[in-house]
Image (cartoon, grey):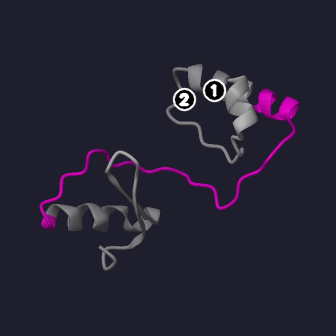
Amino acid sequence: MIDAGAEDIELDEEGFFNITTSMEDFGPMMKKLEELGIEPETAELQRIPHETKTLEKEDAMKILKVIDLFEDDDDVQKVFHNLELTDELMEEM
């Protein structure tokens, strides 16, 4: 899988492997998985931030409201952000 462009392979808590590649290596990775007889549960492109930002609670809640508005819009397919979701924010949600 490294030859196909795997940058990171992690085992999640549900027993699934998460393989991270660059966008350019997505196609070759899918071909490699097919060659190996591995059928992915899901395969999608995602934007993963290199670094996340922590905001004050009030500002973070405003951003989360904007994210919710985007996600509720039928014309929006995916919403990506780099907000650090702290335990305090998760409790507020």
Viewer-side residue, 44 vs 58: 58
Query: How far is mark 2 from mark 1, CA to CA?
Result: 6 Å
Q: Residue at x 87, y 29 (%)?
A: 58
User: Could you tell me which quadrant the C terminus lies in?
Assistant: top right
Disc 1 target residue: 70
Q: Give neighbour class at mark 1: few <14, some 14-19, many 20+ (Cα, 10 Å).
A: some
Viewer-side residue, 41 vs 77: 41
Residue 78 in the image: state x and y as whole percent. 52, 36
Q: Is 58 covered by the magenta stretch? A: yes
What amino acid does circle 2 point to? Val
With respect to residue 45, does 68 lie above or below? above
Residue at disc 2, secondary structure: loop
Which tag, 2 or 1, sits closer to the chain's start? 1
Residue 3 in the image: state x and y as whole percent. 31, 80
Q: Which mark is residue 58?
A: none
Residue at disc 1, secondary structure: helix
**What are the residue bounds of the magenta stretch?**
35-63
Residue 34 in the image: state x and y as whole percent. 16, 61
Identify the main secondary structure in magenta.
loop
What amino acid does circle 1 point to? Phe
Viewer-side residue, 22 vs 7: 7
Contact flag, marks 2 and 1 (Cβ < 8 Å): yes
With respect to residue 87, does 49 lie above or below? below
Q: Residue at x 72, y 29 (%)?
A: 64
With respect to residue 47, does 57 lie above or below? above
Disc 2 target residue: 76
Q: Residue at x 26, y 45 (%)?
A: 41
Asked if residue 62 lies left or right of residue 25, the reply is right
Residue 55 in the image: state x and y as whole percent. 83, 42
Q: Quadrant of residue 69?
A: top right
